Image (cartoon, grey):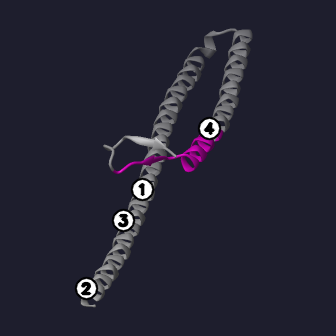
Amino acid sequence: MQDIEAREAIIEQGKKMDKLMQAVTDAAKQKHEADQLAMQEKVKTTIIEVQSKIYDKSTAYTNLIMIGGYAGSFATWAATRPQLPAKANVTIALSLTISLASFILFEVYKMTYTAVKFLKNRHLLVQSLPYLCSSCPFGSAQWS
């Protein structure tokens, strides 16, 4: 009789141990998933920051070069204007105006195109970030 009671007690302890192990496994899985979500947010934020900085720097450089070029053109024209015939002055003024208008239209187009591209890239980042595996070295990823 004692053997049966002892076996039942051992079986009951085994069941409790299984429940405890399942709870620990579930907790570890939840922790792992939370860590993965945190890593994905960090990667997403880093990518967005890098893209923004690259765009800002390239835009600033382009604007500096273009402003310098137009300032030089207008300064040269202003310095040589008294020596030029009226027809040449009109031609230069018209050429500079067409060039400046073309540049402004191009910049508006580029701004719109770039904004659409960045929105698409952000959408891709939000929708399909890789699932980073904790057992893999950093940088290895499996696409979910």
* Magenta stretch: includes residue 46: no
Answer with mark 3 or mark 4, whichever residue precedes in sequence.
Answer: 3
The kind of residue on which mark 1 rests is Gln
Quadrant location of the N terminus? bottom left
Residue, disc 2: 3
Q: Position of residue 40 (x, y in %)?
A: 45, 52
Residue, disc 3: 28
Disc 2 from disc 1: Cα separation:
49 Å
Q: Which mark is residue 135?
A: none
Span highlighted in magenta in the image: 116-134
Q: Are marks 1 and 4 in contact (CB under 8 Å)?
A: no
As drawn, the residue found furthest toward the front would be 1
- Secondary element at image label 1: helix
Answer with mark 3 or mark 2, whichever residue precedes in sequence.
Answer: 2
Q: Which mark is residue 117?
A: 4
Check the image and report above or below for 53 versus 10: above
- Secondary element at image label 2: helix
The kind of residue on which mark 4 rests is Lys
> How dense is the environment of label 1, judged by Cα within 10 Å: few (below 14), some, or many (20 and up)?
some
> How dense is the environment of label 2, judged by Cα within 10 Å: few (below 14), some, or many (20 and up)?
few
> How dense is the environment of label 3, judged by Cα within 10 Å: few (below 14), some, or many (20 and up)?
few
> How dense is the environment of label 4, judged by Cα within 10 Å: few (below 14), some, or many (20 and up)?
few
